[in-house]
């Protein structure tokens, strides 16, 4: 169980953000990154883990 816990804790984990000012002063009312932000976070986590595995 400890080995599994250490393995999970060693992974990158990017979470939702909320309550931020809309980027670039856009007229949109987006104050969180849910939706497509999830896809971006998943891609960033996968890329980050790949770079860590390759020691770049």
Image (tube, helix red, strand yellow):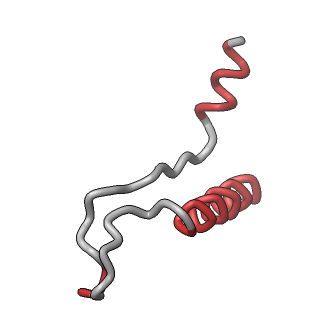
**Where, by quadrant of the figure, is residue 38 drawn?**
bottom right
Q: Is residue 40 above or below residue 23?
A: above
Left or right relative to 22: residue 42: right
Where's the C terminus, which quadrant? bottom right
**Where, by quadrant of the figure, is residue 5 drawn?**
top right
Left or right relative to 27: residue 52: right
Q: Position of residue 13 (x, y in %)?
A: 55, 46
Q: Nearer the viewer, residue 51 or 22?
A: 22
Q: Nearer the viewer, residue 34 or 2?
A: 34
Q: Nearer the viewer, residue 30 or 40?
A: 30
Q: Is residue 13 above or below residue 3?
A: below
Residue drawn at x 58%, y 47% is 12
Residue drawn at x 68%, y 64% is 47
Q: How many marks?
A: 0
Where's the N terminus, which quadrant? top right
Residue drawn at x 72%, y 22% is 4
Residue found at the far top of this picture: 1
Q: Position of residue 14 (x, y in %)?
A: 51, 51
Residue drawn at x 48%, y 60% is 34
Left or right relative to 12: residue 33: left
Q: Position of residue 2 (x, y in %)?
A: 67, 13
Left or right relative to 39: residue 32: left
Q: Position of residue 29 (x, y in %)?
A: 30, 75
**Where, by quadrant of the figure, is residue 6 drawn?**
top right
Q: Is residue 40 above or below residue 27?
A: above
């Amino acid at each position: 169980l400890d080995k599994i816990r250490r393995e999970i804790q060693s992974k990158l984990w990017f979470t939702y953000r909320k309550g931020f000012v809309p980027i670039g002063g856009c007229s949109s009312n987006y104050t969180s990154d849910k939706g497509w932000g999830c896809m971006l976070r998943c891609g960033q986590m996968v890329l980050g883990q790949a770079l860590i595995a390759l020691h770049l």
